[in-house]
């Protein structure tokens, strides 16, 4: 009698755990889409003001952490980025965000250069770094993994080919949560 109860409870527990894992994966997928929507809105809103200062808007990360969020704005320039450039851009971006008010929670604004391990946001950025080592974090697994390191082989439209341990993996750019160049020293 007790053995039968244990078997049924274990079976129900496994089914419940699978259901919870599935729901968490679904939530993660939709949450990633929500964050991508906020980031794309911020890119549309901030591109012109940043370019007016003479910089390229390299990309934006929006990190939601409870009641407090972080907005990271990456700027680039052919002559490099200095601390004064970040301060000037921060003032301009802050003014735009105050007027437009796209983020309803508290947030910290960070303005930075992309650095040597630069994050990659667009197909054109991945295209520019063909042949370089990169690491990507995915929303949905590819080849059984969400974290991949490899060489950027090619970019066609919104599809990235990453060579991981001699195998070419095809990855939709929409599936990439975060991508970075791996710095070589």
Image (cartoon, rainbow, N blue to C red):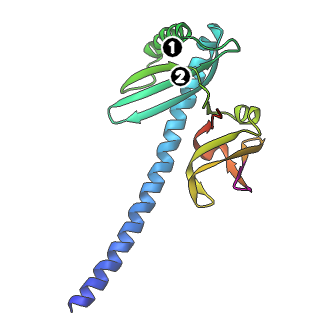
- Asked if the residue under mark 1 is in contact with the one under mark 2, i.e. CB atoms within 8 Å, the reply is yes
Residue 83: % across, % down: 52, 11
Q: Residue at the location (60% across, 19% down)?
A: 75
* Quarter of the image with the C terminus in it: top right
Q: Quadrant of residue 50?
A: top right
Residue 67: % across, % down: 32, 32
Q: Nearer the viewer, mark 2 or mark 1?
A: 2
Identify the residue position indicated by label 2 in the image: 73
Residue farthest to the front, as pictured: 185
Residue 173: % across, % down: 66, 43
Q: Is residue 109 above or below residue 11?
A: above
Q: Is residue 53 above or below residue 72?
A: above
Q: Is residue 134 above or below residue 6?
A: above
Q: Secondary structure at mark 1?
A: helix
Residue farthest to the bottom, as pictured: 1
Residue farthest to the left, as pictured: 2
Please tell me the numbered disc located at residue 112.
none
Q: Residues within 10 Å of mark 2 (few under 14, many from 20)?
A: many
Q: Residue at the location (63% across, 37% down)?
A: 182
Residue 166 included in the magenta stretch of the image: yes
Dominant SS of magenta comes to: strand
Residue 21 included in the magenta stretch of the image: no
Residue range in magenta is: 162-167
- From the viewer's side, name the closer residue of 80 and 72: 80
Residue 118: % across, % down: 61, 30
Q: Judge left or right: residue 71 versus residue 106.
A: right
- Measured in 3D between alpha carbons, the distance from the residue under mark 2 to the one under mark 1, in whole angstroms, is 9 Å
Identify the residue position indicated by label 1 in the image: 93
């Amino acid at each position: 009698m007790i053995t039968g109860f244990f078997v049924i409870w274990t079976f129900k527990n496994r089914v419940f755990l699978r259901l919870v894992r599935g729901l968490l994966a679904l939530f993660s997928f939709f949450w990633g889409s929500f964050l991508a929507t906020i980031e794309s809105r911020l890119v549309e809103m901030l591109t012109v003001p940043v370019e007016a200062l003479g910089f390229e808007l390299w990309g934006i990360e929006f990190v939601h952490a409870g009641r407090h969020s972080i907005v990271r704005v990456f700027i680039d320039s052919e002559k490099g980025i200095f601390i004064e450039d970040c301060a000037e851009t921060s003032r301009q971006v802050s003014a735009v965000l105050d007027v437009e008010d796209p983020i309803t929670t508290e947030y910290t604004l960070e303005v930075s250069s992309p650095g040597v391990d630069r994050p990659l946001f667009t197909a054109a950025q991945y295209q520019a770094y063909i042949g370089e080592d990169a690491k990507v974090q995915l929303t949905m697994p590819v080849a059984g993994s969400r974290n991949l390191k490899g060489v950027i082989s090619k970019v066609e439209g919104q599809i990235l080919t990453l060579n991981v341990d001699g195998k070419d993996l095809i990855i939709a750019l929409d599936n990439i949560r975060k991508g970075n160049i791996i710095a070589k020293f």
